[in-house]
Amino acid sequence: MTRQLPLDLPARPALGRDDFFVSPANADALAAIERWPGWPGGKLLLCGAPGAGKTHLVHVWAARSGGHVLAARQLAQTDVAALVETGRDIALEDIDRIAGDAPAERALFHLHNLALAEGRRLLLSSTEERPDLALPDLHSRIAGTPRARLHPPDDALLSAVLIKLFADRQLTVPPRVIGHLARRMERSLSVAARVVATLDSLSLARQCRITPRLADSALDIVARSGQ
């Protein structure tokens, strides 16, 4: 294990295109993102489980398109008309989280219609493929939006993401630890992030290297915390 600094610094995720690892689990979604100028209807809904890579893909798209990224929960406090008037395309993250929030749903409905009328591209992300939005007109528009899906990670993707998560924390671990984790952990990128964070904390607290044995301790802690 190596560190650049002997401090428990917050991780700084790398969200560039070169940091996005392509596998059969995400290749179709990446291809859809990269076709953004030609999206049918000018919009796309990116779906996937928590930690599947939605935020990373949104930022890949924003870097390529020059688009503005906004959390859907900020919509009720956002001047939608001014946002569209910037001339930039727009990405809204986690639209499923505003289901039942009437002001936010109305703001999304207004943004959807205004952005597309002005020729802006609109990228939406959601854990749910069909968010349970209460506003009928908004629900129908989102239901008719083309979708790109991120699937559960395969072995290659999970291993690559583990390496990236460790690197984000300025940690280098032996390949045998990566393989050990990939074989034993739940097939979830959000769980991978929790395991890496737990391993980082354990290695600091115990002042020891990251080994398969320490990895098992981290897996046990994460499993108990999820019960």
Image (tube, rainbow, N blue to C red):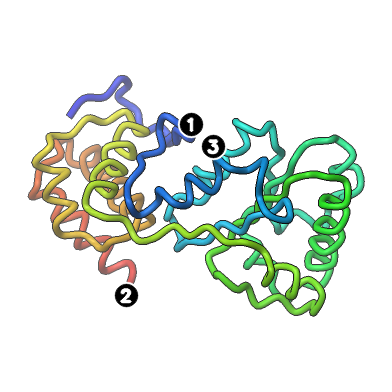
Circle nearer the N terminus (2, 3)? 3
Type of amino acid under label 2 = Gln
Q: Report which residue position mark 3 lands on.
A: 60
Packing grade of label 1 (10 A; few <14, some 14-19, many >=20) is: some
In the image, 207: left or right of 107?
Answer: left
Circle nearer the N terminus (3, 1)? 1
Q: Report which residue position mark 1 lands on.
A: 16
Indicate the secondary structure of the residue bearing disc 2.
loop
Residue 51, quarter of the rendered image: bottom left
Considering depth in this image, is 26 or 111 the residue closer to the camera?
A: 26
Considering depth in this image, is 117 or 175 the residue closer to the camera?
A: 117
Q: Report which residue position mark 2 lands on.
A: 227
In the image, 129: left or right of 5?
Answer: right
For the residues marked 3 and 1, what is the alpha-carbon distance in whole angstroms?
6 Å
Could you tell me which residue is drawn at 22 percent across and 30 percent down? 172
Q: Position of residue 139 (x, y in %)?
A: 73, 74
| In contact (CB < 8 Å): disc 3 and disc 1 | yes
In the image, 118: left or right of 218?
Answer: right
Disc 2 or disc 1, which is closer to the eye? 1
